[in-house]
């Protein structure tokens, strides 16, 4: 089977997106374009395909000592962002359902996927393209179409992903693509990523936290 790399933008039951990349003769390629999927669908895909790495946009680790809901890695990431953008990194206490769904999914994938990591696609977009700060700030807001198009073209161009812009492009689709790319880079170009360290001695959960370097 062909090894594939899975990216997952975890949100609600009707708004979770996946994207799958594979390494071809000319580099990485999108083999499953961004599409909605249930958690059960995602686990079934991992059972059926040779998923060697998955990157999930959700907090996969936690520590009871971190009562504010911010982990040490979250605080590190906030310092890498412009002051007006640090609210992109939310506390687990405020997100509630997303960390729960992400950890459920990571647990269900762990018997069949060897590499499970956490990422933050919006921060990855900024760290990869700081000159595109304005579209990155706006692509999750009202009338995001033009901003999404700019970011989709920039990301697919950087990584040689020949893929037409989806006619109904949304932020979840872009985020899933970024997650899949991070899963691929973790195996193929690990030096292009930065690890955000979890320093809590009582940490628990699955997966180290990586963003673009």
Image: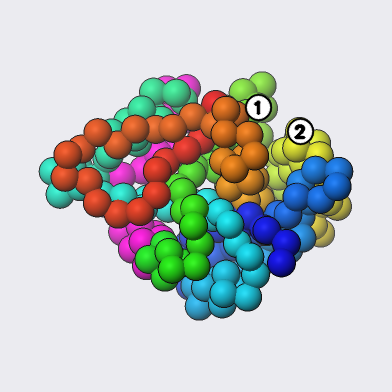
Residue 95 at least partly seen: no
Q: Is residue 95 left or right of residue 47?
A: left
Picture coordinates of residue 85, whole percent (x, y): 46, 30
Q: What residue do we see at 24% from left, 33% from top?
A: 199
Give the camera-side residue of 149 and 187.
Answer: 187
Q: Vertically, is 19 above or below 85?
A: below
Residue holding disc 1: 129
The crowd level at tag 1 (other Cα within 10 Å; few <14, some 14-19, many 20+) is: some
Evaluate if marks 1 and 2 touch, with contact meaning CB atoms under 8 Å apart: yes
Q: Nearer the viewer, mark 1 or mark 2?
A: 2
Give the camera-side residue of 56 and 28.
Answer: 28
The crowd level at tag 2 (other Cα within 10 Å; few <14, some 14-19, many 20+) is: few
Picture coordinates of residue 126, whole percent (x, y): 58, 30
Q: What residue do we see at 22% from left, 46% from top?
A: 203
Q: Vertically, is 33 above or below 94?
A: below
Q: Which residues are magenta?
A: 82-104
Residue holding disc 2: 158
Q: Vertically, is 82 above or below 164?
A: above
Q: Residue 150, located in which quarter of the rendered image?
A: top right
Q: What residue do we see at 63% from left, 65% from top?
A: 50
Q: Secondary structure at mark 1?
A: loop
Q: What residue do we see at 68% from left, 58% from top?
A: 3
Q: Residue 44, located in which quarter of the rendered image?
A: bottom right
Tally of marks: 2
- Would you say the magenta stretch is mainly helix, strand or loop? helix
Q: Earlier in the sequence, mark 1 or mark 2?
A: 1
Q: Is residue 148 left or right of residue 14?
A: right
Q: Secondary structure at mark 2?
A: helix
Residue 13 at least partly seen: yes
How far apart marks 1 and 2 lie (CA) works out to 10 Å
């Amino acid at each position: 089977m062909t090894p594939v790399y899975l990216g997952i933008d975890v949100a609600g039951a009707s708004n979770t997106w996946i994207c799958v990349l594979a390494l071809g003769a000319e580099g990485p390629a999108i083999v499953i374009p961004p599409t909605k999927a249930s958690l059960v669908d995602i686990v079934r895909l991992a059972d059926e395909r040779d998923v060697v790495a998955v990157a999930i946009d959700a907090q996969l680790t936690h520590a009871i000592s971190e009562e504010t809901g911010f982990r040490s890695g979250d605080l590190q990431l906030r310092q890498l962002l412009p002051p007006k953008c640090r609210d992109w990194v939310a506390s687990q206490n405020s997100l509630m359902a997303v960390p729960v769904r992400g950890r459920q999914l990571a647990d269900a994938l762990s018997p069949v996927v060897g590499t499970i990591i956490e990422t933050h696609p919006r921060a990855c977009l900024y760290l990869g393209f700081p000159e595109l700060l304005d579209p990155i700030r706006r692509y999750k807001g009202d009338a995001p179409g033009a901003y999404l198009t700019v970011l989709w073209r920039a990301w697919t161009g950087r990584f040689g992903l020949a893929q037409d812009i989806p006619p109904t492009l949304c932020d979840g689709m872009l985020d899933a693509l970024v997650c899949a790319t991070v899963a691929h880079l973790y195996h193929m170009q690990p030096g292009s990523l930065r690890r955000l360290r979890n320093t809590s001695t009582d940490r628990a959960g699955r997966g180290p936290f990586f963003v673009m370097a």
